[in-house]
């Protein structure tokens, strides 16, 4: 018996929303769970690095799962910088484990955002943006999508979720998309893990990484676009 392809396509979104509904139900029927969530929310929304670190440490290995879930839910609840859980992971679990946690979290969050974007479809997207804007996005994704995703991932100051949604909506090849995501997020995760103990050095390091990446990308786009235009 074959499974309808439509249901396969929507399966990640369905399971995600079912999971969210279950969390909400548990939140309202279990006082202990509710208190833990409220405490976690207050700690993270405070932005206090030391307080957040100590709180995550108290969960032991479960803290890693909490950080991964926060990276995923950050797609829906933008209340703190996307790189904050990556810093906390480095401070709590060390260099290598934090890089792995960051990669898993970004992989899952990016996949979910891509699938959500993919369900939007091109026809729906055309209803909200002009044909000219759509054609530009379509051209960009088809010709520079791979490198665009890398740059958006390597820079913590650009919209990671936005590029994932657009890549899905314009049906960019998923394997190409997720490979670009991993390539882009790896140096960022490594830099965050390396400089996490010094927030000033971290900000400076991230700025350099973002600046160099965008510069190289701009030069590449300029010469490639010029070549295409001449042809």
Image (spheres, rainbow, N blue to C red):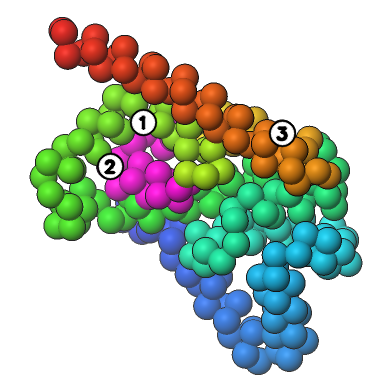
Residue 52: which quarter of the image? bottom right
Q: Secondary structure at mark 3?
A: helix
* Residue at x-position 30% and y-position 40%: 171
In depth, the one of 52 and 108 nearer the eye is: 52
The N terminus: image quadrant: bottom left
Residue 177: which quarter of the image? top left
Residue 84 coordinates in the image, percent (x, y) = 67, 54
Q: What's the mark number on residue 170? A: 2
The C terminus: image quadrant: top left
Residue 228 coordinates in the image, percent (x, y) = 21, 13
- The magenta segment is 159-178
- How far apart marks 3 and 1 lie (CA) works out to 23 Å
Q: Earlier in the sequence, mark 2 or mark 3?
A: 2
- Between marks 2 and 3 in the image, the one whose residue lies nearer the viewer: 3
Residue 100: which quarter of the image? top right
In the picture of the structure, the residue carrying the numbered disc 3 is: 190
In the picture of the structure, the residue carrying the numbered disc 1 is: 145
In depth, the one of 18 and 212 nearer the eye is: 212
Q: Earlier in the sequence, mark 2 or mark 1?
A: 1
Q: Badge 3, how many Cα within 10 Å: few under 14, some, many 20+?
A: some
Whether residue 178 can be seen here: no
Q: What's the mark number on residue 195? A: none
- Between marks 2 and 1 in the image, the one whose residue lies nearer the viewer: 1
Q: Secondary structure at mark 1?
A: helix
């Amino acid at each position: 018996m074959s499974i309808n392809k439509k249901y396969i396509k929507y399966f990640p979104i369905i399971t995600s929303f079912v999971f969210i509904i279950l969390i909400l139900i548990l939140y309202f029927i279990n006082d202990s769970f509710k208190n833990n969530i409220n405490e976690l929310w207050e700690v993270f929304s405070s932005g206090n690095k030391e307080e957040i670190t100590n709180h995550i440490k108290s969960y032991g290995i479960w803290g890693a799962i909490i950080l991964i879930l926060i990276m995923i839910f950050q797609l829906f609840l933008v209340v703190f910088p996307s790189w904050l859980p990556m810093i906390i992971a480095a401070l709590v679990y060390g260099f290598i484990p934090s890089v792995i946690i960051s990669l898993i979290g970004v992989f899952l969050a990016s996949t979910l955002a891509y699938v959500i974007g993919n369900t939007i479809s091109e026809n729906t997207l055309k209803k909200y943006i002009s044909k000219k804007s759509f054609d530009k996005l379509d051209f960009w994704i088809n010709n520079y999508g791979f490198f665009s995703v890398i740059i958006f991932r390597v820079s913590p100051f650009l919209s990671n979720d936005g590029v994932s949604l657009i890549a899905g909506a314009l049906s960019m090849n998923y394997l190409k998309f997720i490979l670009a995501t991993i390539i882009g997020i790896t140096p960022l995760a490594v830099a965050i893990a390396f400089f996490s103990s010094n927030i000033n050095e971290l900000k400076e390091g991230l700025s350099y990484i973002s600046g160099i990446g965008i510069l190289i990308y701009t030069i590449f786009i300029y010469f490639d676009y010029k070549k295409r235009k001449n042809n």
